Image: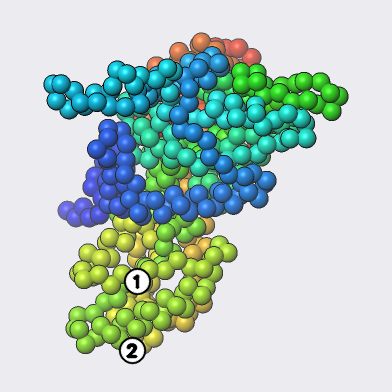
């Protein structure tokens, strides 16, 4: 009887995908649950990934004329009430501040001071359209003030009942862009431009293939005229919304009185947009690339491209091996990958070699180098690629250094190609409701289904029963005549349907 292969992560993806995900987060030392229910502590390795995401995206935003600013995390409740659809969409998720001081409770502990009740409750920021809109109403007077292109890096709170680290937490980190324009054409162009930036980042930096599309009416951002998203498929064949860009029309401008004098001298309402991605991207990164031995990181986001592990048994060997490793590190950081110096670490902790090796495997470092006395004597290194399961081989030091950038690019491409192949394998075109039900049956693997549809109660009822959602209408999808599989009505487009996070 063949032995069952041993893996660093238990259970495996096949055995229990949700629990596998939690164990990868733990084994890679990315985050842990906090003392506040539904919130997480992002640990240094996880936060370093987020910093790389921030740095890359921030440069892309600024290259298109956007500037960073910061707005209050507290929003007067009356601001939300001004946009009815918006407040209805977020009302169930809002955390509310009602007092500004505590006092001793006669029965022990503390309680809100009755005399410190706020005149108006404050909402802890679930999203900032309303308070930023109120600010923009003061900034905008003339067409000469436009466009306003603002981004902020911040935290938000949405009171989730069922949480999972990175994917859905009560508090999470994100960026939110907010812009104001003189015309609807400019605002729509902005909305699509930011969607393109998100898609470019996802595919070229995260190595995560995505579908760009417009959300159906039922999935639209509360208060928006149109919502666009990038949708990715995870290894369990569920979809993940990885970024959104909203054309808000004049809805928020009218609610927040964002007016300006146009070139004809008339007072008119502005056109606004908003767009954002969050730490959910780290969850997507985990579920797109990782395996049963832990995290697998694309080089462009890895906190370290290369980790060097000195290996020696005798103290007499230590100095020689460490000197070799330090000089090797100097050579490596002088190389460049993705227009940056290589990120290299030496791990000389007093741990057994096997234990140290597996820690870095589980953390997903793209390349692991092991250096012992024999390697020093021969001028070699033992190099292992994480995308190939951590298997390695001996190679001349000079040859490795000369080719390290090409190796990292090969890893980046391998991860994207692998994820794209998995998505293609799980994508089908479906033309009948019977096929649709079979594809999304309880024990079926599922995936992405392209189907003709018409927004309406018939579709919503069937999707609810199957626990499937309409992900988007692909921007690159062609118009074609067909019949909605849910209602039998004429349809001119296909949407993407999937179970989702």
Give the residue at x 59% y 52%.
Answer: 59
Residue 484 percent across, percent down from the top left: 57, 17
Residue 185 position by quadrant: top right
Give the left or right position of residue 182, taking residue 350 as reference: right
Q: Residue furthest right?
A: 264
- Secondary structure state at the residue bearing disc 1: strand
Q: Nearer the viewer, residue 243 or 412?
A: 243
Above or below, comparing residue 240 to residue 384 in the picture: above
Above or below, comparing residue 483 to residue 3 in the picture: above
Q: Nearer the viewer, residue 366 or 160?
A: 160
Q: Nearer the viewer, residue 155 or 200?
A: 155
Q: Residue furthest front?
A: 115
- Secondary structure state at the residue bearing disc 2: helix
Alpha carbon of mark 2 to alpha carbon of mark 1: how far?
19 Å
Q: Which mark is residue 346?
A: 1
Give the residue at x 41% y 63%.
Answer: 304
Give the left or right position of residue 370, taking residue 496 as reference: left
Residue 133 visible somewhere in the drawing: yes
Q: Which mark is residue 377?
A: 2
All told, the count of numbered labels is 2
């Amino acid at each position: 009887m063949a032995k069952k292969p041993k893996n660093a992560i238990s259970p495996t993806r096949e055995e229990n995908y949700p629990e596998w995900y939690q164990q990868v987060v733990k084994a890679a030392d990315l985050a842990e649950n906090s003392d506040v229910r539904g919130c997480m502590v992002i640990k240094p390795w996880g936060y370093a990934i987020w910093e790389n995401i921030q740095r890359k995206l921030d440069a892309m935003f600024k290259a298109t004329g956007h500037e960073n600013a910061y707005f209050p995390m507290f929003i007067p409740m009356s601001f939300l009430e001004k946009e009815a659809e918006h407040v209805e969409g977020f009302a169930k998720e809002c955390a509310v501040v009602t007092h500004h001081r505590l006092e001793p409770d006669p029965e022990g502990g503390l309680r809100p001071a009755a005399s410190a009740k706020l005149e108006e409750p404050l909402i802890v920021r679930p999203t900032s359209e309303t308070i930023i809109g109120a600010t923009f109403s003061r900034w905008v007077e003339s067409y000469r003030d436009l466009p306003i292109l603002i981004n902020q890096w911040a935290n938000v709170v949405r009171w989730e009942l069922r949480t999972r680290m990175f994917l859905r937490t009560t508090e999470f980190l994100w960026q939110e862009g907010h812009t104001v324009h003189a015309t609807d054409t400019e605002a729509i162009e902005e909305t699509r431009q930011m969607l393109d930036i998100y898609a470019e980042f996802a595919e070229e930096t995260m190595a995560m293939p995505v579908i760009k599309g417009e959300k159906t009416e039922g999935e639209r951002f509360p208060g928006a005229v149109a919502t666009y998203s990038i949708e990715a498929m995870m290894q369990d064949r569920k979809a993940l919304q990885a970024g959104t860009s909203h054309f808000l029309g004049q809805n928020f401008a009218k609610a927040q009185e964002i007016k300006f004098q146009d070139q004809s001298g008339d007072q008119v309402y502005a056109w606004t947009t908003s767009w954002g991605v969050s730490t959910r991207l780290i969850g997507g990164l985990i579920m797109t690339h990782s395996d049963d031995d832990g995290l697998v990181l694309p080089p462009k986001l890895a906190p370290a491209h290369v980790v060097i592990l000195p290996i020696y048994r005798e103290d007499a060997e230590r100095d020689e091996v460490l000197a070799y490793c330090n000089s090797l590190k100097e050579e490596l950081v002088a190389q460049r990958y993705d227009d940056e110096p290589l990120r290299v670490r030496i791990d000389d902790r007093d741990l057994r070699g096997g234990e140290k090796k597996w820690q870095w495997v589980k953390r997903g470092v793209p390349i692991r180098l092991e250096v012992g006395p024999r390697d020093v004597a021969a001028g070699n290194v033992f190099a292992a690629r994480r995308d190939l399961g951590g298997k390695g081989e001996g190679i001349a030091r000079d040859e490795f250094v000369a080719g390290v950038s090409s190796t990292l690019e090969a890893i980046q491409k391998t991860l994207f190609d692998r994820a794209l192949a998995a998505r293609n394998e799980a994508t089908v075109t479906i033309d009948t409701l019977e096929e649709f039900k079979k594809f999304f049956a309880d024990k079926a693997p599922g995936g992405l289904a392209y189907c003709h549809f018409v927004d309406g109660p018939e579709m919503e009822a069937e999707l609810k029963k199957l626990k499937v959602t309409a992900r988007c209408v692909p921007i690159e999808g062609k118009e074609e005549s067909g019949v909605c599989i849910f209602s039998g009505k004429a349809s001119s487009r296909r949407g993407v349907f999937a179970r989702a996070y």
